Amino acid sequence: MADIATPEFLNELQSLYPATAKYVDGDWFLAASIAFSSSNCPEAVPRVLRYALDDLDKLPDTSYEDRKLLVRKMRDGIFKSGMLSGCPKAINALVSLYEATPEDLRDTEPLRDSTRSNEEDVAVGQAYFDSTFGDSATKIQSVLRSIYPDLEHFTMSIGCGYVDSFTEVISIKETTFATISAMIANATLGLLEWHLTRAVHNGATVEEVRAVREIALRIAIKAGVPLKIEVPNI
């Protein structure tokens, strides 16, 4: 279904996101790549990459570091979204992204600290979970523990501890964008309104949040994702 990611459609998606001083801070390509991945259109991800890199290369003073960061943001966003959309979708999108990535922009070593113990991951994950869910954290964690204790441990150690708490590539704000984009493209909308509001708490403007929502929504509709209820807005 790569033909839905036409230059015209990508230009439309880009135009939805508010202008930023630096191209790599304009998270349209992050939201779009995650939405394509979560909508099970992995073959569209390379088109986002090529479009964004071409745009970046047209700008004066674009550095190697800018190009590297753009690729890393797409890669890490898709990786984080796999916690919501499922590993098969994320893996397929990451394979497509890897094949389209210039060799000098590929990473060959983990970005996260893979030497941390499980106990350290759990401690970091608990802190991130508490910060993310605020006053609701204890109640939500209790629900996770009740429905399946292994799910609670996985969430604290892997989901929050190893995956989401790493913010050296995409920030907490952008991690929330990844969540929003994946939830819409998966048609899992139950907690979406809460995450839209949380994105503002994490530093996003209302305009940015609305743009991420709209980018993901337009991709989901193009991809034929069955949205059975109205998608919440902020």
Image: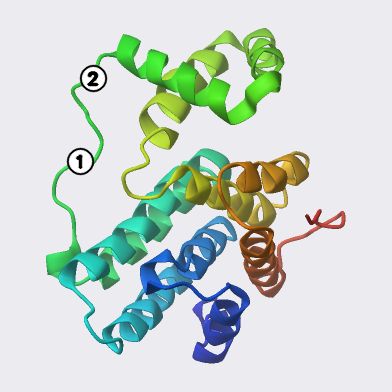
The residue where tag 1 is placed is: 110
Q: Is residue 191 above or below residue 55?
A: above
Q: Is residue 66 above or below residue 228?
A: below
The residue where tag 2 is placed is: 116
Give 224 or 231, whichever is nearer the viewer. Answer: 231
Q: Is residue 108 above or below residue 143?
A: below
Which residue is rendered at x = 71% and y = 62% of the image?
225
Asked whether, in this view, residue 169 is left or right of residue 2, the answer is left
Image quadrant where residue 109 sits: top left
- Image coordinates for residue 194, horizontal then vertical, percent: 74, 40
Q: How is the image coloured?
A: rainbow
Residue with the most extreme right position = 229
The reply to whether residue 219 is in sight is yes
Q: Secondary structure at mark 2?
A: loop
Which residue is rendered at x = 35% and y = 19% of the image?
121
Which residue is rendered at x = 25% and y = 70% of the image?
67
Q: Amino acid at mark 1?
A: Pro
- Image coordinates for residue 51, horizontal then vertical, percent: 39, 82
- How many C-alpha atoms fall within 10 Å of the one at disc 1: few (<14), some, or many (≥20)? few
- How many C-alpha atoms fall within 10 Å of the one at disc 2: few (<14), some, or many (≥20)? few
